[in-house]
Image (tube, grey):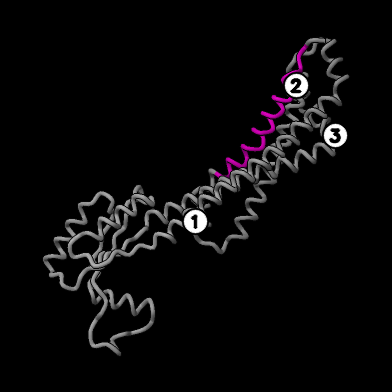
């Protein structure tokens, strides 16, 4: 019986070549876009996580603070639940950092160090919200011994806003193209069913089982899905090769490599099978 189903499925391909290739192209595009959108969204989430887990606030201290005052202030900051990590940067370290970053040594002009000591604070990810950040900065600014609190919040929030917008647009574009692909495959299945109408009616008259009537068409759709997955997999390898120079991208893909391969191989046949079953739902054994 399986051999019969397969023979009939391949016969359908020969009878409707143009529809087959149209379905193949649209399904391949749908499969690749779904996988590409998932990769892009996961990359965006990874980038967003890296940004939110590395948000730093510079708390500059007054020059009048003594060593004991600094230790007391650090102990007080360490108890804050919104702080993940805190490190002290003394005036000498601040000068070295400035020279390293700018390439200019102010010590050749000034006989003193104008840079203040500071605490570099890394926040907990759960507090990276605009309202929370405003409260945190206000709270830090009011602490004794604090001269100034610096946080590039506008830049951080702008980047995070861009990431969220990109993810939203990817969802919308993928959904539209995916629906178009589903419609094309569905229409193809309906055309195949229509072209086999007389044959299906004959099969019903001779007492054929419902599975005998439907399975060749469903297998035809699954074949389209399998080939589409293979084409999408080839496109996936081309994508990886073209972005081989991006170390972070390669590292991310390597971590999730097996997951993406299985995803690409599964999406095509699954989508096609579901569409075929749905398109054949009205076919019954009633003559």
Q: Which disc is residue 214 wearing? A: 2
Q: Residue at x 60, y 45 (%)?
A: 35
Q: Which disc is residue 251 wearing? A: 1
In the structure shown, which secondary structural element does the residue marked by tag 2 occupy?
helix
Residue 85 located left or right of residue 277: left
Pick the residue in front: 173 or 50.
173
* Residue 78, horizontal then vertical, whole percent: 21, 55
Q: Which residues are magenta?
A: 260-285
What quarter of the picture does the C terminus occupy?
A: top right
Disc 3, disc 1: CB below 8 Å? Answer: no
Q: Residue at x 30, y 52 (%)?
A: 135
Q: CA distance from mark 3 to mark 2?
A: 17 Å
Disc 3, disc 2: CB below 8 Å? Answer: no
Q: CA distance from mark 2 to mark 1?
A: 45 Å
Which residue position is annotated with label 3?
16
Residue 220 lies in the magenta-colored region: no
Q: Residue at x 73, y 34 (%)?
A: 183
What quarter of the picture does the N terminus occupy?
A: top right
* Residue 257, horizontal then vertical, whole percent: 53, 48
Which mark is first along the chain, 1 or 2?
A: 2
* Residue 195, horizontal then vertical, whole percent: 86, 26
């Amino acid at each position: 019986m399986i051999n019969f189903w397969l023979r009939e499925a391949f016969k359908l391909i020969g009878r409707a070549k143009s529809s087959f290739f149209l379905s193949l192209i649209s399904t391949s595009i749908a499969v690749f876009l779904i996988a590409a959108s998932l990769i892009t969204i996961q990359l965006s989430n990874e980038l967003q996580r890296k940004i939110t887990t590395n948000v730093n606030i510079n708390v500059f201290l007054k020059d009048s603070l003594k060593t004991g005052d600094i230790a007391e202030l650090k102990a007080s900051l360490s108890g804050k639940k919104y702080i993940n990590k805190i490190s002290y940067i003394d005036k000498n370290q601040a000068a070295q950092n400035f020279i390293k970053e700018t390439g200019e040594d102010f010590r050749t002009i000034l006989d003193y160090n104008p840079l203040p000591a500071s605490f570099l604070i890394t926040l907990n990810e759960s507090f990276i919200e605009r309202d929370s950040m405003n409260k945190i900065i206000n709270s830090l600014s009011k602490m004794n011994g604090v001269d100034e609190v610096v946080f590039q919040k506008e830049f951080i929030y702008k980047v995070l806003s861009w990431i969220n917008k990109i993810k939203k647009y990817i969802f919308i574009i993928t959904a539209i193209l995916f629906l178009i692909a589903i419609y094309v495959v569905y229409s193809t299945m309906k055309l195949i069913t229509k072209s086999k109408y007389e044959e299906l009616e004959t099969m019903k008259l001779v007492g054929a089982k419902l599975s005998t009537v439907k399975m060749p068409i469903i297998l035809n759709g699954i074949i389209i899905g399998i080939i589409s997955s293979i084409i999408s997999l080839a496109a996936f390898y081309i994508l990886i090769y073209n972005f081989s120079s991006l170390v972070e991208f390669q590292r991310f893909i390597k971590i999730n490599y097996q997951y993406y391969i299985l995803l690409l191989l599964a999406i095509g046949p699954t989508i096609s099978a579901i569409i075929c079953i749905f398109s054949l739902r009205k076919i019954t054994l009633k003559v």
